[in-house]
Structures are given as structure tokens and as C-alpha cells.
Amino acid sequence: QVQLVESGGGLVQAGGSLRLSCAASGRTFSSLTMGWFRQAPGKEREFVAAIGWSDYSTNYADSGKGRFTISRDNAKNTVYLRMNTLKPDDTAVYYCAATSRNLGLGQRRRQDLYDYWGQGTQVTVSS
């Protein structure tokens, strides 16, 4: 089992920045593929970004390319999502997810391939 706890959400003005953190416990973090997803009010949950465990490769949804950066610190069992130039459309609950599968870049967008999920952290971007 893996427990995931997100933090770092909050209220920010458009153009601002936030850094989300997701602390993992219960399994060797260094062998987990980690992802961030989000769910806006009235919408389905969608992929945001992911990072592999074997090569640290990253991929992003088009909505976040150039603005969001995912990274991991295996010594701290934590994955981060740095979000810059935030827009009101980024308002959502952001979820951290993990899997022991070594997912390819295309697979990381698939929510059904992640086994563990956090409770989410609210990000609200005001205009």
C-alpha cells in the first residue's frame, strides 16, 4: 500500500504561482511512477503531468506545457508540481497518483493505470 498526501494548494491571483507537494509513504518511492491529475467543477478528472521512476522522464498535458513542472525528490519521498502563470481555468482539485508500473509516456495519461490516489488539494485562481 501507498499513502499519498498532497499539500500546497490555495487561492492565488491569475499570473501567480504555486508549488504542490505530494508526500508518499508505505512503499519504496523511488520505484513509483508518479502523476498529477485535476478535476474542475462539473468536469471529469484529467491528466496534468507525470514523472517516471526509472529515467525521470516527464510528460505534460497541453494545458500545462511551458507553465507546469513536475519533479521528484526520492530522498524526501515527495513529488512536486510547480505551476507558473496560473489561469482561472487551472482552478481545480489537484490529485497525486502513483503506480508501481513502469508506464510509458503515453500510458501515464491513463487514470486506470494508477493504483494509489491522494485526497486532493484545492487550487483556486482568481481573475
Image (spheres, rainbow, N blue to C red):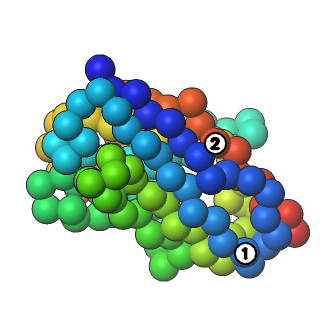
In the image, 67: left or right of 4?
A: right
Q: Which residue is mark 2?
A: 121
- In this picture, is 115 found above or below 74? above
* Relative side of 75 to 44, left or right: left
Which residue occupies the extreme right position in the image? 127
Task: Tell me if I can see residue 93 in this picture.
Answer: yes
Q: Is residue 60 visible?
A: no
Residue at left 44%, top 34%? 4
Instruction: Tell me where residue 100 sits by quadrant.
Output: top left
**Element assignment for label 2:** strand
Residue on which disc 1 sits:
16
Q: Left or right of 52: which side holds 71?
A: right
Q: Position of residue 119 (x, y in %)?
A: 57, 30
Observer-nearest residue: 105 or 5?
5
> Real-space Cα distance between discs 1 and 2?
17 Å
Q: Return the x and y of residue 124 as percentages of the image width and height.
A: 77, 54
